[in-house]
Image: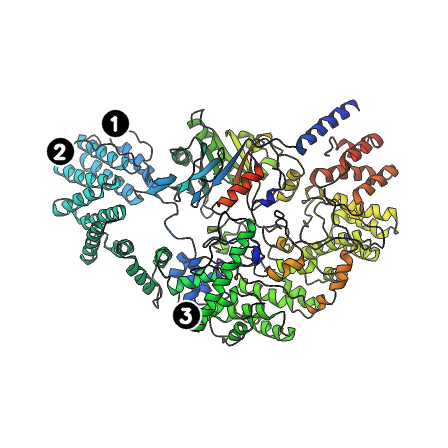
Amino acid sequence: MGLLIIVALVSALASAGQAAPEPPRALVLWAWERPEDLTRAAPGVEVAAVTGFIQIEGDQIQARGRRFPLLTDAVRRTAVVHVQIDPKTPLKWTPALRARLAATVLSYGRAPGFSAMQIDFEVPASQRQALLDLVSDVRAALPASEPLSMNALASWCETEDWLAAAKADEIVPMVFRLGEGGAKLKAKLEAGGDFANPRCRSAIGLSTDTPLKRWPGGRRIYVFNPRSWTTGEIARVTEDIHP
Amino acid sequence: MKKPFATVLALASLITPLATPVIACGPPPEGPAYIDVFGGETADLNAFYDGRVGVVTAQSPRARLFMAWRLLHHLPVGATAGGPLSVPCCGDGPSGAWDAASAWAQARGQVSGVTAGSAPDSERPGANYTSIPNCFAAAFNLATQTLGERVKAYGAGSPWVKAWLDGQDAVFSACGGKATPMPALDPGAPAWLKADRAYQEAAYALYAGQNADAAKDFAAIGRDAASPWAPMSPYLTARALLRQAIATKTAGDATAAEAAIRALANAPATTFGQGEAPAMAKTIGVRVDPARALATYDAELTRPTLNADAATDFRDYVDLNAKAARPTEIMDWIWTLKSQAPGATKVADDADVAAQAAQTKAAQAFSLVHAKQRWGATHDPAWLLAAMSLADPTDPDAPSLAAAAAEVAPSDPAYLSATYQRVRLTIAAAPAADTRTLLDQVLARGDLSTTDRNLFLGERMQVAASLAAFDRDALRARLCADDNDKSGCVRSSYTEQAEASGVYDAANKTGFGPDARALIDRMPLATRMAMVKDQSLPATLRLDLALTSWTRAVLMQDNPSIDALSVSLKSMLPQLSAEFARVASTAPGPDKRFAEFFILAKSPGMSTDLQGYTRPDGSIASWQGAWYDWMILPAGSTKGDSAPPCLLEYAPDGYCQSDPPRDVSDTALWPTSDIVCLTYCGAGAFPMRRPDFMAATLNQANAERARVPAPYDDTHKLGASVWAEVLTYAKAHPKDARSPEALYWLVHVTRYGHSHDHLSHQAFDILHQQFPSSPWTAKTKYYFD
């Protein structure tokens, strides 16, 4: 019984922590593939902007840089490289493609003016190795001083354990566009819970169109907007999150 | 983090006065896919290209509205032009340059002493973190081909081939904006290499942005009859001058580019690159004389036949219109449909929500006036449709617009839109039988798209003469299902696809429309129970109806209904068969209530309404959803304050904004919302008409709400806690095998749901003190206050 009491006490303390969560470590606005003017963001607000778009078709790569202007005064800027697999052409994951993909991601991710990189690559279960390989190769090629972040479906952080092999410095579970299991996870977070995988507890991705009443504190908060940011939205997000 | 994130942004607000401004070309929110403003699946897209315009949806992309305009004016579209017009245009898709550059990097290894390197950048940095395509796949492919030919002709170890490679490396270094100097060529180089080098130097200048030099160099190559590159000279000279004109924006450079492009166009038909001349002429024309270019585009886009370049032409057309003093008729119509008629109030990004709402309403009103003026001046049905889509049923001109719509012949391409909007504007006042007759005629047509059929079913449902008819009309066919690449839907090109799960039939093909769900939630218990028995409805939807009705009956403590539904649910939800059987077989009293509450404790996702409910699927442990902190009133009390879910929540990703506070009751939202077409069809409101059989039971539905309290939250408490009663019962009945399990579930409830009064801690303590050896205790290691 003594042990149970201790366990319960620890839990109660954790609950107390949940009631007054730690402030976020940073607020990061995602600047996606549209014209973005983030110059009205408060000092200290970071920007993570798409700088490269890569599509894999079989063993071929289609790639391009950012087409839409980004205005920002943010001191810390993260280059986001979006990678996707053409659903109409099955992936042929060969050593040659692996090497070319890593080189392509590095080319776009190390864009001038950016000090960190983020890989945005949603893969189905059958192609997780491609993601792990890519993250591993990019991490190995980057200087230690340049952090590598990766986005993750929230389910990867909750019901799956393969992310342990991901060599990223930061994993950002995206709590929007949730599929199966999303309702339960959302309820868990809103009730003060956290992601099952500890590696997913340093950052969180939210979206302006997916309301969440509560989320775990003490981490970097990335916010996605399905449309170009407006001044009002930037102000409201900043006010709500208080970095 | 002080405030709920829900306050950040109101997306897809369905209430017209408070609607978030719609971005001109932005997509509507995600699913459910009963209405697809992007055109639906392959068969519907093809039928549209072939002339079936259907119901015009104002939130469609501008290019689709352009096609609709043509079809409304009896101008064909065709699949050749229609396909590219149905996806985002243009030039922002990924290029194949990367792989071509990689192939070039590999090819370099053919030369002795050279190792394959990394692919050169094909894009140069632009302003504000943009990348600008500079070298295209064709350039890398040509270099790869030429290198192979030179190695074959002169040998991999030839110093001249190495010199050629050094020159080409310099050329491609310019692609990424970091040009290295072109190495000097040995005066003793062979003639072939001198000719190649001249071409390389011209290309180098082009990629380095020295366009005038490049043009001179390419022109000189054209004068060298011995150069193998001479045939490419007219095209490359014109291209370099075009780049120069775009970069400098001077009249002189534009004139020079025009002349070169004209020369290319007038050259013999076999001239290299001549096919590019028309596109180049358009590009320079836009810059030299925008007004003339706009007129040219307008003429081309309204010709009897669209060419294959219509998508790119339309993109330029939109840009030119945006800068023109007066837009063309087509763009005027498109912008007006979107509540952005020229001169309309702009919605300020940084205004507060109330100000934005006022601006949005003002823009709608302005656009409506403009559309009515254009309709009056032109008698063009397209303008009638625009005016109708912007009008509310309460608009003074609504009757005359509806009357005009009634004159549109069924064979007219505007007929379906006119009829849909006419019904929307008149359904409240028109005799239901007349509306039914009209809609039945439409629904009998064999040429409706899936979206259009769903829309007309939404209207037909509102005049259903019986519950059976309502059930039939409430069902809608799903479009563009997830992971179905064969559907041919193009909406994934515009927006990510993420849809609610657990709201369709077992095959994921049909479900209740959001408008139907809203009406069902506003029906009294008896009507909902009758729907449970309607075998024409899919079993999964009947399960949804049964569970939400059962929850409602439990909170009302309506024992006959509880028993009847429990009997049904015994077979409908086998995972809880024993629990429902026990409820049905237990006499009213504390034991029966515990049996009922025990089910509530085991079942996340239970709700009194379809909105807010999550269907159980699979094993109980995998059920999704959250638990409400249920409250219950004493028998006979009518002080309940349960209200139907906020109307806006029936929309995809919809929710009711709480900050600043606003009235989200049906009284406030019903007259101004549109959850039939989700505002996709236009800014005009669509206050739903309750079917007559339902209107007659409105008082009963309200009376039932008065018997149910809203769930507990931090600022509101009415009635007694259901969970507290479970706790008390379990504590008092230690020999009941369900007691430890109930306590386990109470702890679970507080982890994933809502509770108060340290319920989790209390349940945890009782469980561990009274049931130390229970397996449910072993599974309960923590509490979650």
Look at the image and tell me whether residue A179 can be seen: no
> Three-letter amino acid code at disc 1?
Gly
Q: Quadrant of residue B331?
A: bottom left
Q: Main secondary structure of the magenta part?
A: loop
The answer for how far apart the CA atoms under marks 1 and 3 are is: 66 Å
At horizontal 75% and vertical 33% (from top left) the residue drawn is B780
Is residue B289 shown left or right of residue B491? left
| Parent chain of label 2 | B
Q: Amino acid at mark 2?
A: Ala
Picture disc at residue B664: none
Q: Which mark is residue B73?
A: 3
The residue at which mark 2 appears reads as B189
Residue at image point 60% right, 64% down: B458
Query: Which span of residues is magenta-colored?
Result: B175-183
Quick one: SS at disc 1?
A: loop
Identify the secondary structure beneath mark 2: loop
Of B654 and B371, the residue lying toward us: B371
Residue B539 in the image, given as x and y percentages of width and height: 69, 57
Mark 2 to mark 3 CA distance (whole Å): 65 Å
